[in-house]
Every structure is written in structure tokens, then in C-alpha cells.
């Protein structure tokens, strides 16, 4: 490929010509979408390890009934920090990091539409993230008031008001989420502008890779869903410092108002996290099935439909707040409707596999795990949409198990699939298949050991967010098994880290197109040069590399 | 300059004290390791609070609906999961396969239409059945002789007030058994004194949130006598985990006896007069009510008939004079972040106050 030689030269210059500090400085001042993407993913993985350790500590506390490993205040900080970190500092940055890295490459562009806004968004997010963790040092504003936030990741009013949350911990939570949200909004604008205006010649919206379509839908959701959250954070801050009474029930404020604001953001947020996973699956499954994605247009339409419907389902998080029967019935209906386009996606992935020649490389293993786990997560979602059953299940470990099936079983599995799939492109080196398979199987076993029994714990009356449970209630076995699963998951993540480090040092060279894939990013060198493509590419179909490799049977003759 | 060093020094002292306090707390907690204050054995005597073992109408219509939904989703899982497993095995790449790409299938409108329509139909049925159950539970008519109870959530205990009967109690809700021939449901009005809580007794009904500045309603009609365990279902701060509920369903005659006993003012046993005096002259009265005495605090549970309750600390410990002794001395031993402070009584005073409390039958 034309780019390879020039990249090699550029890299050589960089390696040889510059002192170490200068190289670090280049990362700090960079506006290159690839470097920013990698920085998002790297920082996200770092926070992933931190929040994972927080989860492991909570599982140790809950392994046995009546356990006193950590006191209640510490446990509540752990659960708040774990949830906030995983959503805002792990899921969002890793997924937007992938979009940052991949969208320009997949549409044949040389960078994002606004490279400097891109860097601004990253640093805003990064310092917002640091602010959350600075609370451990700086939030003890009132003697004995505690350090990190302890109000839960959805921070229901009025627990966050000054009467119940003294000191500064909640303020750190507010400001951190405010900053990271503004950063993410900037990224969303950038993704939309890039996708709309920087597509290469021939790439109509109808020829956009499915992942880029999902990036577009995700970015629109971010743009619509994040501002209400930011607004609510400002209102809460006004409550706490200026005597406003938005959520201050002691002065006539409304506790429910906060819940509406939060979930108007919070439910689309679930799709902001899961749609990228759908995008990865829609790129990786076809390549390892050796088949074109089944029903491209229906797939895209289903994604857009999910995006729209997801904006009208928020109060299914609030079935127990005492809504009228009509209100409950409305949100039952809208929530159930999401199942239809979601089902279509699963069927289309199934049809893509059907009749293929499946290669079980590591990215594909993670995709298959994703398919089964997401199927179950979707079905438990339907179960939770049944409002009367939800009155029993909401705020129990059944819900915890359900959304960890989405966040871990679907999204984390697809993040790993995407890392194994695109790591060769980003670094020029392959990850070890052997270690990767160990990573996959250990994670799969650990995941099911941890989260399958927790469904049952919920059905047996175990609420979420309890630091202790009493013996004799039939919860011991479920919790012990769940805690044992953590060891497997931790081992899997450790192997993953070893795999990455090992590959960076001595991994096999990847070449431009190690998976025999079909989208534009595989036409340039690995890693791609700063300008991505020496010549702007031109496409005639959804799979430009298929056309190149099969000139006798090109895609454009069918589309 | 001196001022600065002073404040640094005092800051350091505070941190050192905090660290020492943490160490002592940890030491104390490790002593309390595995001490469950009798609740484990008590819990084991109750039926597990499985949502599929309903004992009242709201829980049982929900369980029936749940069986139906689990059946439908289970069938979908078997079909789709089965197809997926079949496809993975059937279409795997085998050693010796040639390198030719498989036939490329771009899509099929009839198939897409089929697997759009079928889910729409399933969803339609689920919505209708769910809607019916919502109305059965939420829009149930209230019979004129229904028992009315005000439930007030506090950090971290429950207050139960029976306005028509003049009874106030805590953490253990007594209701009459409602037999289908003579239904006598209990209607609960849910209010909060501070933050959001949620009232949840799985075998009787689903959760209804207890939200400040808002009155929510729910109802239960236990069909069998017995004790039903529940607990707060909405994160409400430090001790959310130890905010348990016991609902005691009694046959009408026994319930009437309980009502009569609760309506009497506090027992005045001359043997515990010294303890009573101590109780009335310490900070206890700021938070607790004992009817028939000047103690009229509302911040903590009503103690008028304390010993008629099975547990203390909202289910954190079984109620016994020995546990009361630990509790009054320092409640944090049993429930670390409870809002009740350690009373710092001398051992002799502590014995007398506990003797008085233990006389409040």
C-alpha cells in the first residue's frame, strides 16, 4: 500500500529524532483523531481496572452474610464510584475513543471535522474524570463528612441535598459529571459533522459502514440526552449553594423532578453505550463469517428506530414511584416496542452467520458470547418492562444482573472483540490468539458465575446497594458463587493486560489487512499515517475491499 | 505565620484522631464478626421471601403474570438461542474447507417482514396482559371497612400509624388476615420524613416508593397468618441495608387483641421506677415517645410497647434485654451508622434504663 512506506519513514523520524519528553509532549498537544482515540481508550481502560477493583471489594464484602469487611459508608462510596466510573469514565470514553479512531478511517477522511474541538473534548473529559477521583483527597470539606461521593450513581434527590449530604463529595460528583458531559457533547457534535460532511467520494449514506451509522445514531442520542443531565447538575448545584429548591423536598421541591431529569438522560445513555457495541458486532461478525451483513438497510433502520424509541422510555425506571395506571401502561408500551428493532438486529446477525464459514478467531469468540448474552439481556429487559413484575424486581439484584448482562455480557465483550479486531490496525502488531482464547473463556466463565445467580438473589428479595445481608434468607449460596466468579474475571483481565503488553513488545507484525476484511481502514498501513490515506479513496459499494478482491463479483452489482 | 502552622497542626491532629477512630472501629467490627444478633435463626424460621411464593392478591396476580412472561421469553430464548447454537456448529469453518468465500446473501424482504411482524404480535399480547394487571393492582376499589395505615419512612426505620385506632408502632406492621370470603385488605399511605425509601414485602406486593412531599398508596391482603419479611427497596443512605420490615398478619380475633394491647398507655412497673426516671431525664425523650409519660419525641420509634416487637434497630437485632443493653450503650455496635447516638450511661444507669425499657410490654 502507498501509505506504508511513508508511515515507516514518519515513525522512524519520530523515534530517532525526538527525545522522550518531546514525544510525550506530542501526545499532549495532538489533535490527531487516532491519537485522541487511543488516549480515550487507554484512559478508559485504566479507569476500568480501578472500577473493577471497587466491584471486587464489594463482592468480597457480600461473599458472606453479615460480613464486616468494609463499613457501610465505605461500601456506599464504592458502589457510587463503581457505577459513576464505569458509565462516565469507562464506557463513554472507550466507545467514543473507538469512534474517534475509526469513523474517519472508515469513511475515508483524513481527520475529524473539528480536530481542535476533539482535543478540547478529550481534555475536558479527562480533567472531569480526575476531579471525581480527587474527591478522595479534597471532599472532606466538613470534618467527618466523608470523602468520595456516596449517593449512588443516579443520586436520587433529596439524598444529595445539603441536609443529607454534607461536605463536598456530592459537589465533586456534580462537577465531574458536568465536565465529562460537556466533553462528550463536543465529541458528539464532531462525530455528526464528520459523518455528514467528510465522507469520501462515492460513499453515500446508503454505503456507510453499519458501525458508522451507529456512531451517527449514538452521537445524536448524546447530543439530545446529555444536556438534560447537565441542566439537572446545575440545578442541584444551585440547590446546594444558592438556596434554590428544585429538588429540596424540605422546602417544597420535587424529588421526582430529579428522577425524570436523570432518566431522560439515563435511559438513552444505555443505548449510547450499547449501540456502539452493535456497531462493532455488525463489522466483526460478517468478516469472520465471510459473509456480507444480512439486510443492511433494515439493520440501519432498526438502529435509527432504537435511537428514537429510546428517547420515550425513561419512566420504566420509575414504575414504582406511584405513577397512574395510564402512565405506567404508556411506558410499558414504549419499552416493549424497543424489543422489536432489537430483535430484528439479533435475527440479522443470526442470518449473517447462517450459511457462512465461521472463523473462531478471538474477536469472533467475543462476538458469539455477545450474541447469547445480549439475547438474554434483551429478554430480561422485556421481563422488567412488565410493570407489575417490575414492582417486584426494580432495585433488586435481578436488575443488577440484567444491566450487567448488557454492560458486561454485551458491551464489555464487544469492547474486547473490538480491541482484538482493531489492535493490529492501531499498533501494527497482532495480539496473541492463545492468550486471547484464555482471556475469553475465563471471562465467560467468571461472568456467568457472577451474574447468573444474582438474578435468583433478586427473585429471593435481595435489594441492590445493601452493604450487608442477614443469614437465613436463602441468599448465601447465590452471593458466594457470584463472588467466586470475580476471581475468574480478574484473571481474564490480567491475561488481557499481559497480552497487550507482550504484543506491544514482541507481537507478530500485522500487515495492512490481517483479517481479510472489507472496509476502508484496512486499505491503509498499520498503524495508519497521520493523514490516514495518501490519496483520498473512492468507493462504489459498502465493501470497497470486497470489490477490490473480487473484481469478478463486486458488491456494487447487487446493491 | 504562627496561625498557619497552628491550623496545619490541628488539621494533622484531626486526621490522626480520625485514623485512630477508624482503627478502633475496625477492631470493634472484627469482634462483631459473625455476630448476627439472633436474626439468622429467626429468618430461617420464615419462608424465604421468594416473589414466586405470593401470600396476597397483588403479589399473586404479579406472580401469575410473571409465569406467563417467563414462559414467553423462555420459549423465545430456546428458539433463538437454539438456532444460534445450531448455526455456529453447522457453519463453522472446518479444516480442509476450500478458501472460496461462501455465497453472499444481501437480505430478503419476506424474511425481514416475518421477523418484524412476529415480535410485534408477541409484544402486543404482552402489552395487553400487562395493562390488565396494572389496573387490577393499581385501580383496585377500596372497601369501606379496609384498614388504613400511614407508613412513614425514616432514615433507617419505619413508622406505622393507625389513625382510626390511635396506634403508633415501628418496623413491624400488624394487619388482619383477609380471607377471600370476608376480604379485609389493608390500604397503606406512604410518606417519607426525609429521603426516598421504598416499601417492599415481596410475598405480599411489589414495591411502592416512599417519596418525600408525596403520598403514595398501595394495598395488601395477606391470605394466611404469619410473618412476612421485607425491606427498604430504594437506596436511602448509609444504613439502607438494615431497614427491614416485618408484616405480621393475624386472624381477626388475635389482631383485635393486639390492637387492644397497643391502645393501652405504657405499663408503669414500680420495680423499674428508677430506670423510668433516668429515661425521662436523659436525651432519650428528645427522640422517643412513651405514651403516658412526658416523653414525646418523634424522631425515633415509639417505645410505648417496645417489648411487643420482635426486633430492634429496624430488624438489625432480635429484641431481648441483652441486645437492648448493647443497643442503648452504643447502637453503632449493631448498626454502625444509625442516627441514634451512644448514650454514654454508667453501667448502673444503663442497667436501670434497660430494665425500664424491658418492662414496656
Image: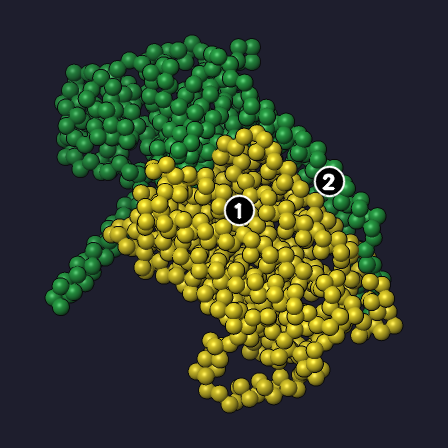
Chain colours: A yellow, B green
Q: x, y (%) of residue A443?
A: 58, 57
Q: Residue at x 81, y 59 (%)?
A: B106
Q: Which residue in the structure is indicated by mark 2?
A: B120
Q: Is residue A514 above or below residue B343?
A: below
In the drawing, does residue A232 fall left or right of residue B82?
Answer: left
Dot 2: element: helix
Q: Residue at x 76, y 45 (%)?
A: B116
Using the rendered image, report if marks 2 and 1 lie on a common chain.
no
The number of discs equals: 2
Q: x, y (%) of residue B317?
A: 34, 32
Q: Residue at x 49, y 25 (%)?
A: B218
Chain ID, mark 2: B
Q: Residue at x 33, y 32 (%)?
A: B313
Judge depth for marks 2 and 1 and give the one in front: 1
In the drawing, does residue A103 fall left or right of residue B146?
Answer: right
Q: Is residue A237 visible?
A: yes
Specify the quadrant that holds the N terminus of chain B: bottom left
Label 2–label 1 contact, CB within 8 A: no
In the drawing, does residue A259 fall left or right of residue B13?
Answer: right
The quadrant holding residue B13 is bottom left
The quadrant holding residue B232 is top left
Q: Viewer-proximal residue, A410 or B164?
A: B164
Dot 1: element: helix
Q: Viewer-proximal residue, A388 or A405?
A: A388
Between the residue at mark 2 and the residue at mark 1, the CA separation in whole angstroms equals 25 Å
Q: Viewer-proximal residue, B38 or A61?
A: A61
Q: Is residue B242 above or below residue B169?
A: below
- Neighbours of disc 2 within 10 Å: few (<14), some (14-19), many (20+): some
Q: Which residue in the structure is indicated by mark 1?
A: A264
Amino acid at each position: 500500500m502507498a501509505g506504508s512506506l511513508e508511515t515507516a519513514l514518519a515513525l522512524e523520524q519520530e523515534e530517532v529524532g525526538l527525545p522522550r519528553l518531546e514525544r510525550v509532549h506530542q501526545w499532549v498537544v495532538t489533535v490527531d483523531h487516532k491519537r485522541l482515540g487511543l488516549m480515550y481508550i487507554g484512559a478508559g481502560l485504566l479507569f476500568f481496572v480501578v472500577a473493577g477493583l471497587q466491584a471486587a471489594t464489594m463482592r468480597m464484602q457480600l461473599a458472606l452474610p453479615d460480613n464486616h469487611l468494609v463499613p457501610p459508608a465505605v461500601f456506599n462510596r464504592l458502589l457510587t464510584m463503581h457505577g459513576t466510573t464505569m458509565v462516565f469514565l469507562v464506557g463513554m470514553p472507550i466507545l467514543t475513543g473507538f469512534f474517534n479512531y475509526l469513523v474517519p478511517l472508515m469513511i475515508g477522511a483524513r481527520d475529524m471535522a473539528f480536530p481542535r474541538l476533539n482535543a478540547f473534548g478529550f481534555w475536558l473529559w479527562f480533567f472531569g474524570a480526575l476531579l471525581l477521583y480527587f474527591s478522595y483527597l479534597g471532599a472532606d470539606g466538613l470534618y467527618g463528612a466523608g470523602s468520595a461521593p456516596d449517593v449512588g450513581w443516579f443520586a436520587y434527590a433529596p439524598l444529595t441535598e445539603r441536609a443529607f449530604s454534607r461536605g463536598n463529595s456530592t459537589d465533586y460528583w456534580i462537577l465531574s459529571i458536568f465536565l465529562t458531559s460537556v466533553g462528550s457533547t463536543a465529541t458528539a457534535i464532531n462525530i455528526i459533522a464528520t459523518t455528514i460532511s467528510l465522507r469520501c467520494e462515492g460513499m453515500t449514506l446508503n454505503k456507510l459502514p453499519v458501525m458508522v451509522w451507529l456512531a451517527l445514531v449514538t452521537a445524536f442520542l448524546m447530543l439530545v440526552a446529555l444536556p438534560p443531565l447537565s441542566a439537572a447538575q446545575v440545578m442541584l448545584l444551585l440547590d446546594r449553594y444558592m438556596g434554590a429548591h428544585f429538588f429540596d423536598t424540605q422546602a417544597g421541591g420535587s424529588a421526582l423532578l430529579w428522577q425524570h431529569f436523570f432518566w431522560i438522560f439515563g435511559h438513552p445513555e444505555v443505548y449510547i453505550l450499547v449501540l456502539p457495541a452493535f456497531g462493532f458486532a455488525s463489522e466483526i461478525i460478517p468478516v469472520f463469517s465471510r459473509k456480507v451483513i444480512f439486510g443492511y438497510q433494515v439493520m440501519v433502520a432498526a438502529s435509527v428506530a432504537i435511537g428514537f424509541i429510546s428517547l420515550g422510555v425513561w419512566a420504566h425506571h420509575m414504575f414504582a414511584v406511584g405513577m397512574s395506571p395510564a402512565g405506567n401502561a404508556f411506558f410499558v408500551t414504549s419499552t416493549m416496542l424497543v424489543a422489536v428493532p432489537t430483535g430484528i438486529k439479533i435475527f440479522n446477525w443470526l442470518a449473517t452467520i447462517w450459511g457462512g464459514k465461521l472463523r473462531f478467531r478471538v474477536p469472533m469468540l467475543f462476538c458469539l458470547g455477545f450474541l447469547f448474552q445480549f439475547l438474554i439481556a434483551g429478554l430480561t429487559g422485556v421481563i422488567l418492562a412488565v410493570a407489575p413484575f417490575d414492582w417486584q424486581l426494580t432495585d433488586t439484584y435481578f436488575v443488577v444482573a440484567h444491566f450487567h448482562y448488557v454492560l458486561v455480557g454485551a458491551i464489555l465483550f464487544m469492547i474486547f472483540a473490538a480491541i482484538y479486531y482493531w489492535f493490529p490496525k492501531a499498533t501494527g502488531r497482532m495480539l496473541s490468539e492463545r492468550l486471547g482464547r484464555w482471556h475469553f473463556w475465563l471471562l465467560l466463565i467468571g461472568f456467568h458465575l457472577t451474574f447468573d445467580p444474582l438474578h435468583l438473589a433478586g427473585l429471593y428479595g435481595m435489594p441492590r446497594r445493601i452493604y450487608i445481608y442477614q443469614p437465613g434468607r436463602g441468599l448465601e449460596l447465590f452471593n458466594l458463587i457470584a463472588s467466586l466468579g470475580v476471581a475468574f474475571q480478574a484473571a481474564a483481565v490480567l491475561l488481557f493486560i499481559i497480552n497487550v503488553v507482550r504484543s506491544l513488545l514482541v507481537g507478530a507484525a500485522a500487515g495492512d489487512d490481517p483479517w481479510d476484511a472489507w472496509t476502508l481502514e484496512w486499505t491503509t498501513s498499520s498503524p495508519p499515517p497521520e493523514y490516514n490515506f495518501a490519496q483520498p479513496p473512492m468507493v462504489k459499494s459498502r465493501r470497497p475491499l470486497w470489490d477490490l478482491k473480487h473484481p469478478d463479483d463486486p458488491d456494487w452489482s447487487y446493491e | 505565620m504562627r496561625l498557619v502552622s497552628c491550623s496545619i497542626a490541628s488539621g494533622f491532629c484531626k486526621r490522626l484522631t480520625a485514623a485512630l477512630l477508624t482503627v478502633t472501629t475496625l477492631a470493634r467490627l472484627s469482634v462483631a464478626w459473625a455476630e448476627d444478633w439472633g436474626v439468622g435463626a429467626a429468618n430461617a424460621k420464615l419462608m424465604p421471601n421468594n416473589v414466586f411464593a405470593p401470600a396476597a392478591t397483588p403479589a399473586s396476580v404479579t406472580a401469575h403474570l410473571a409465569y406467563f412472561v417467563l414462559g414467553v421469553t423462555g420459549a423465545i430464548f430456546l428458539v433463538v438461542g437454539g438456532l444460534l447454537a445450531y448455526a455456529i456448529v453447522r457453519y463453522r469453518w472446518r479444516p480442509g474447507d476450500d478458501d472460496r468465500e461462501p455465497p453472499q446473501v444481501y437480505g430478503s424482504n419476506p424474511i425481514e417482514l416475518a421477523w418484524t411482524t412476529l415480535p410485534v404480535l408477541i409484544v402486543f399480547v404482552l402489552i395487553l396482559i400487562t395493562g390488565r394487571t396494572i389496573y387490577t393492582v393499581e385501580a383496585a376499589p377500596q372497601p369501606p371497612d379496609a384498614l388504613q395505615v400511614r407508613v412513614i419512612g425514616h432514615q433507617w426505620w419505619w413508622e406505622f400509624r393507625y389513625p382510626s385506632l390511635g396506634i403508633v408502632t415501628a418496623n413491624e406492621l400488624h394487619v388482619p388476615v383477609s380471607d377471600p370470603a370476608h376480604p379485609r385488605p389493608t390500604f397503606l399511605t406512604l410518606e417519607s420524613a426525609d429521603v426516598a425509601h421504598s416499601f417492599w414485602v415481596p410475598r405480599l406486593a411489589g414495591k411502592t416508593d416512599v417519596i418525600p412531599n408525596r403520598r403514595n398508596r398501595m394495598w395488601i391482603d395477606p391470605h394466611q397468618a404469619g410473618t412476612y419479611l421485607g425491606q427498604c427497596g430504594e437506596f436511602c443512605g448509609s444504613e439502607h441495608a438494615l431497614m427491614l420490615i416485618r408484616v405480621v398478619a393475624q386472624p381477626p380475633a388475635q389482631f383485635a387483641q393486639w390492637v387492644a394491647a397497643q391502645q393501652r398507655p405504657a405499663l408503669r412497673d414500680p420495680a423499674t421506677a428508677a430506670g423510668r426516671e433516668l429515661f425521662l431525664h436523659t436525651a432519650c425523650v428528645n427522640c422517643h415517645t412513651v405514651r403516658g409519660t412526658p416523653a414525646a419525641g418523634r424522631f425515633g420509634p415509639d417505645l410505648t410497647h417496645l417489648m411487643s416487637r420482635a426486633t430492634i434497630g429496624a430488624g438489625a437485632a432480635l429484641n431481648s434485654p441483652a441486645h437492648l443493653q448493647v443497643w442503648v450503650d452504643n447502637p453503632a455496635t449493631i448498626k454502625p451508622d444509625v442516627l441514634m447516638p451512644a448514650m454514654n450511661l454508667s453501667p448502673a444507669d444503663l442497667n436501670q434504663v434497660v430494665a425500664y425499657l424491658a418492662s414496656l410490654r
